[in-house]
Image (spheres, grey):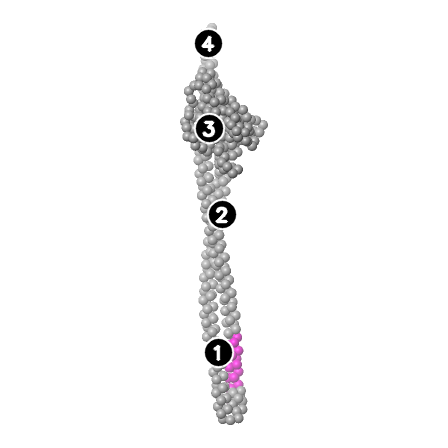
Amino acid sequence: MKKTVVAIATVAVVGLSNVFFTDSIDAASNLQEIKDERSDIKKNLSDAEAKIADVLIDLKEINEEIKQVEASLKANQEATKEVQAEMDELNDEIAELEAAIEERFNILKERAKSYQRNGGNIAYLDVILGSSSFGEFISRVNAVTKITDSDAELIEQQEEDKAKVEEKLSELNELKEELLEMEQLILEQKEANEQKKKELQAKENELKELKSKLQVKDKKLAALEADIYASMQPASSTTASAQSASNGKSGGAAVTGGGVLGWPTKGGYISSHMGPRGGRMHKGMDIARTDRSTSPPIYAADGGTVVSAGYSGAYGNKVVINHNNGMQTVYAHLASLNVSAGQNVSRGTKLGIMGRTGRSTGIHLHFEVYVNGKLQNPAKYF
């Protein structure tokens, strides 16, 4: 009877072990799939950001080209106005010359008609016959001849002046035609640049939309990853407790991290990235809680040894973990601490509760990563 009970108990334990083992394998498998997918997303995000940067450079260049083309168009139009104004002046000058030539020609025609009607020029005869002496007669004949010759020379000169003005007008007309052709080319260039600008803006919007979708997807996967870590937490805690019981709180073999970090809290989202902020360098990333009614637990992002755990000025309650592979992680502003210096922890070990101790705006986790003593962007290691 006892053998039967032992056999049944053994089968039950083995069955439970198999279930736990299967669940662990499934969780680990899902976790790896999520990590792989997030890695692909980050690569795509990086590519999209690089392309956006290229598009912005192209947009800056095309805007400069558009400005230059508009300046050329303005200069061309001003030149065309000046040429047209000069052409208008020349047309007025030609009109005056033509009027003067016509007036002088009409005078000569009237004289010719009078001479023909009367068998001679009455006006001329009156001048000549009115002489009181032969000397005066000769003098008046010479004067009349000079007047007639002078009229003819004046008309000839006016015709020459008109020809010169018309020649200049022709040159200006050719110049105006060139300017108008050039204006058409400039307008075509401007239209092409505007079209290119529209295409670049459309490409920029498309890339930004892609980036936004990737960020949303990554955020969801990060939350799912955190949930998986949370579901694995009891086993991790049990393991850590067992290690502490056998090795002591600060003893035992050091745990070495794998270099790829897990999400250090349950859910949440990145509220502030590493980089310049408020006139100074923000040394890590901030992870804010998504559910305002709870204070999420903070987990070790990878296995390692707790270097320090306590209050540290602006950081508030802070935990520093050495992952024994050249990497260190820092967790700040915790409301409470669950670990102490010297303790070996596994990935997913609960370090404390998210809070706002130290210099902090709102409840969040401030998370930093160092590799071989140099500050790194945490986003690269998830």
Q: Amino acid at mark 1?
A: Ile
Cα separation, mark 2 vs mark 3, equals 45 Å
The reply to whether dot 4 and dot 2 touch (C-beta < 8 Å) is no
Distance CA(mark 2)–CA(mark 1): 63 Å
- CA distance for labels 4 and 1: 141 Å
Give the residue type at disc 4.
Val
Residue nearest the observer in this picture, 13 or 55 = 55
Q: Where does the magenta region start and end? A: 99-119
Q: Residue furthest top?
A: 1
Q: Callout 3: helix, strand or loop?
A: strand
Q: CA distance from mark 4 to mark 2?
A: 78 Å
User: Which comes sooner in the sequence, label 3 or label 4?
Assistant: 4
49 to 72, vertically: above or below: above
> Which numbered tag is attached to residue 198?
2
Q: Work out whether residue 259 or residue 220 is closer to the camera in this orientation and state it.
A: 259
Q: Amino acid under label 2? A: Lys
Q: Are marks 3 and 1 in contact (CB under 8 Å)?
A: no
Q: Which residue is mark 1?
A: 155
